[in-house]
Amino acid sequence: MLITVSGPPGSGKSTNATALADRLGLGHVSGGDIFREMAAERDMTPVEFNEFAEKDPQIDRDLDRRLHEIATTHDDVVLESRLAGWLSDDAADFRFWFDAPIAIRAERIADREDKPVDRAKAETERREASERKRYQAYYDIDIDDLSIYDAAYNTARWGPDRFIDALVATIDAYDPDEDEGKAPIEGVSYDF
């Protein structure tokens, strides 16, 4: 089984993907962790590294190629990244999109990174604008197009334990005999 978890910064991707993988006994791969490691190797913050990546397309392409390979060659994984649903091509069994209002996401990021909320909000908005521009330019992906996802959730509406219960219930309720077809990934240029 391959499950993808996508969403903007602060949406609860990492927290919930980790919990979902644990609950289902699956592996977990985080594109955000890989990206932050790449930023730290260059002594940059993720925001600085995002902006640097605008000038060096190979950074995104290296990360995205790696995630695409994992999605298309590994089983029993929860793959989590902003583009995981798109990068999985048609290999994903379930594609989830997580989101929350920007004020909530900024608070989560501020708590996680020990910074003021207004700074976290401004950095997050800059980061999202940078990523949106790059995804469109590199792969013809409109990150705001949620049509490929099996379910989209506002993670601010549930506590963490109840939300994981809802995700597991969604997966458990799946019956292949009643499946009329998942949304195909079309029009994407996997130019890594």
Image: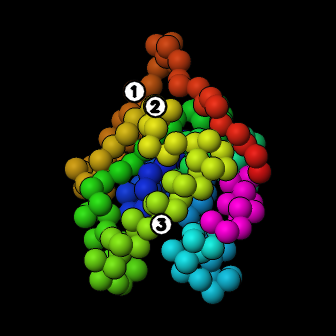
Viewer-proximal residue, 27 or 8?
8
Which amino acid type is shown beneath numbered disc 3?
Arg
> What is the x, y in percent for residue 14?
47, 60
Circle 1 crowding by C-alpha within 10 Å: few under 14, some 14–19, many from 20: few
Q: Quadrant of residue 91?
A: top right
45 shown above or below 50: below
Q: Which residues are magenta?
A: 54-65
* Residue annotated with mark 1: 173
Viewer-proximal residue, 192 or 32?
192
Which amino acid type is shown beneath numbered disc 1?
Ala
Viewer-proximal residue, 187 or 6?
187
> What is the x, y in percent for residue 129?
46, 60
Q: In the shown orientation, is residue 45 left or right of residue 64?
A: left
133 shown above or below 52: above
Secondary structure of the residue carrying numbered label 1: loop
Q: How many marks?
A: 3
N-terminal of the two: label 2 or label 3?
Answer: 3
Residue ID at (68%, 83%): 42
* Residue annotated with mark 3: 127
Residue ID at (55%, 64%): 32
Residue 55 included in the magenta stretch of the image? yes
Residue 26, visible in the rendered structure: no
**Viewer-side label of 1, 3:** 3
Which amino acid type is shown beneath numbered disc 2?
Ser
> What is the x, y in percent for residue 63?
69, 60
Secondary structure of the residue carrying numbered label 2: loop
**Viewer-side label of 2, 3:** 3
Residue ID at (36%, 84%): 114
Spatial distance from mark 2 to mark 3, Cα to Cα?
23 Å
Asked if labels 3 and 1 touch by Cβ distance under 8 angstroms, the answer is no
As drawn, the label of residue 147 is 2
